[in-house]
Amino acid sequence: MIKKRLPIAIDSRVHLANLCKTKSDQFITVNIQRFRYLYLFLLIPCASHATELTGLVIDEGMNALPGVTLHVKGTNLGDITNGQGRYSIHLDSGNYTLAVSSLGYIDQEISIHVSETDKQQLDITLKESVDRLEAVTITASSIKATLESKGFAMKAVDMKDAELSSIQATDILDRTSGVRIRQSGGMGSRTRFNINGLSGNAIRVFIDGVLMQSYGPSFSLSSIPTNMIERIEVYKGVVPVELASDALGGAINIILKKNYAQNTLNTSYSFGSFNTHQFNTSGSLHRPKSGFTLKGSAFYNYSDNNYKVWGNQVYTTEPTTGEIAYVKATRFHDTYSSAGGKVDVGVTGRSWADELLFGMVLSEMSRDIQHGATMESVYGNRRATQNTQLASLSFKDKSFLSEKLSLEAFTSVSNLNRHIIDTSAYIFDWDGKRKARYDKDGNRTGWYEYISGAEAGNPTLQKSKENVFVGRAVSHFQPTDQHKFTTSFLHTGFVRDSEDPLRHVDIRDLEDTRYSSKTIVGLSYEYQAFQEKLKLSSFYKRFTQAVRVVEYKISGDDEVELNRVRRAVNADGFGFSAAYEILPKILLLSSAERSFRLPVAHELFGNLAESLEPNYDLNPEKSKNLNIGFTLGAFTFGKHEAKLQLNTFWRDTKDKIKRNVREDDTDETTEYINDDSYLSRGLDLDVFYAYNGKIHFNGNMSVFNSRFNTEFDENGLQYDWYRDRERNAPFFTTNSNLKYHFENVIQSGSKASIATNLAYVHWFYRDWESLGGAGKDIIPAQTVLDVSITYTFPDQRITLSLDGRNLLDDQVFDNYALQKPGRALYGKINLKIL
């Protein structure tokens, strides 16, 4: 009976797959997957003594392909890949021809030999079909649409076009609605992210789901070349448990290109203003038969950062009269260089693991330090260096023990060596010269010096060694199409040991250690109904942190003082997300949470390179977050395509961790503090329009209304700035990006594009708006115009680009009037060698 029914079942199944080629990929994935279980149920009794041919079908970017039809020619045997791209066919020993086909990909016929074994592995890579380019485009956009339709307030940023230009990933993020990049200067300066009014370390940054801090400070978002990035996922407010961390205000997840299934070699070089050089190369080697995979990348960055600065903090002092003269000065002590490499070696695409890779990261950085916490304190000798060594092991399997269970695991151990050099006491002016001392007759008698003996406090040659351990695991269990369970685990350990040959001889050799560890456990449940129109999820997170400090200081009586600190923190967070498609392409989104953010190492322990003092009493930052929004589209009308997204948010944040603002602008150092509570409301609006695939327009607007929400201090006195807008924080930004694509420019088969981006940041108060009278210190409105031109030669291997940044040469500020670069030009060449 079974042998008579089997051909009918298989023929119907293959016929159904052919019908599905005229439908969307979603139809293939959902409907064929349901029929697959009946087919396997019928096939198993007949193949109990046959060899099981299994494998994974992927595209050239290492993405699993569901709905792929596999047919053994001359038989009625075959299969269709499941949601993880896997297939299974039972065959007797012998020689066969396997036909493989899928919408948007080139059909393949593979000769195979089946031996007398219980199981045999055959992985298949399909190439995109040029003739089916439109279908491929639909499939690619569906990945982005799937991510943006889960209920979280998130934006998936495709990096396909950006990888050819000279701009950095931070520039792309700064153009994203709701996101503001805050930097204290040019290349190499510390980068802080602001998402919907929450900023700093409340925003966590990940690389493929792993905290970026695991890779060391030199391997940062500014140093990762854009041509190594596939997309960037931006979460605003509520963050899913898959990104196992204590992100409070949002998260940025950088998805790197995998290219495991092909051999590649790419390189690029960029040169531009301020003697800026950027070089990177990346490549991969893959052996399909054994699964052996080798992937590597390297980068080098350098800049003099000698751009012009001016304003009420940039002045020189006349040596004899002491009169102040405001000047337009060139930064003279701000060079930066960084270099690094990352290598991963192991196996990919095996039946027992999609990925098992051992990794190594080496990086180093050197930079001059131009000024202190503000631009009032000018430095001419202070500098810092650091280097990082990291070893990692990663494992991924989408069918771990069962097709319903997946597992990702990552662990790393890193060593960071940091060196601060500050031994000169000379005082510099913004003209780059030391301040000279003169007698009454005008004769120079010497130089002015800091009484502390160095530019930023006591003389130091401090060397610190930081060891960081990271362990992360994420597992998904999906018993049915409607239900999914996720568990996540993250543990990090941090130890810093310091020594300084210039410290007091009595404490130089004593133990001076700072230690912190934190563990975050997450659980979530997802439910889908009404043919995936309704998507619900709920989650729970457990936060724990332990801090221990042992340090020695010299008191005013020249006696050794021992300071010991022990702290422990435990907290619970929870939340939910919901999405409902009320009409085709009209989606409602909502998410809410109560969450915590634990202070990180440099906030607790300070960092001399950044003029930060320690604060061991920092409490966790906590917030209640709510997001409500909707998505319209994308709608297509002939050659026109349009899409609109709106997200509104509400944040109630307490014990916000922020840099302290000293009353004296000339203070060389500062520290992080808990800044009471803030209530924030606002919205993000995104508009997209395209015409004929050649003209693309993206526009967005963000409004942040974050206000101080603590009425009385600990003594019962009312704060003068109660209900004031948060100081030193932008509250209104817009971006508009227009791009036009050309084909067959100069040469047949070539491609070119020209793009412009206009960004506007409304003026905002540097301090509380209720303090002071007329002429309050403000950060002025900023308008930045960027233009990018790219040209790709017909063989698609060479691309040239020219980028103009801040062409209006507007004065751009951040972080309490720290000025960023003005007008700049950059050229870049991209080479695809393999």
Image: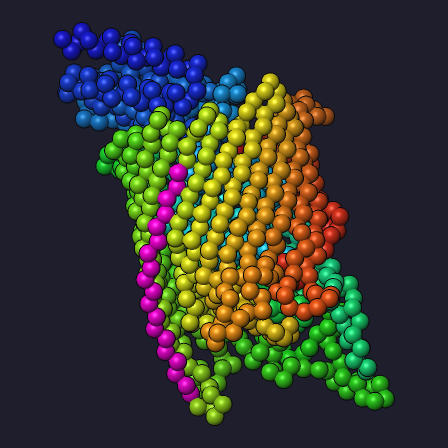
What is the x, y in percent for residue 141?
49, 29
Main secondary-structure element of the magenta-colored stretch: strand
> Is residue 739 depicted above or below 274 in this figure?
above
Front-most of 523 and 730? 730
Quadrant (top left/top right/bottom left/bottom right) for the N terminus: top left
> Is residue 758 depicted above or below 635 in this figure?
below
Front-most of 315 and 464? 315
Which residue lies at the image location 39% right of the left edge and 41% below the top edge? Answer: 577
Q: How many marks?
A: 0
What is the x, y in percent for residue 404?
26, 34
| Residue 785 visible (yes or no) | yes
Which residue lies at the image location 19% right of the left edge and 16% below the top edge? Answer: 42
The quarter of the displayed image where residue 515 is located: bottom left
Q: Which residues are magenta?
A: 560-578
Residue pushed farthest bottom? 557
Is residue 569 one of those drawn in magenta?
yes
What is the x, y in percent for residue 828?
65, 42
Which residue lies at the image location 63% right of the left edge and 48% below the top edge? Answer: 733
> Is residue 574 depicted above or below 414 in this figure?
above
The quarter of the displayed image where residue 123 is located: top left
| Residue 113 visible (yes or no) | no
Q: Along the horizontal axis of the image, is 319 left or right of 602?
A: right
Colouring scheme, one of rainbow, by chain, secondary structure, one colour: rainbow
Front-most of 788 and 711? 711
Is residue 207 one of those drawn in magenta?
no
What is the x, y in percent for residue 536?
36, 37
Which residue lies at the image location 34% right of the left edge and 73% below the top edge? Answer: 566
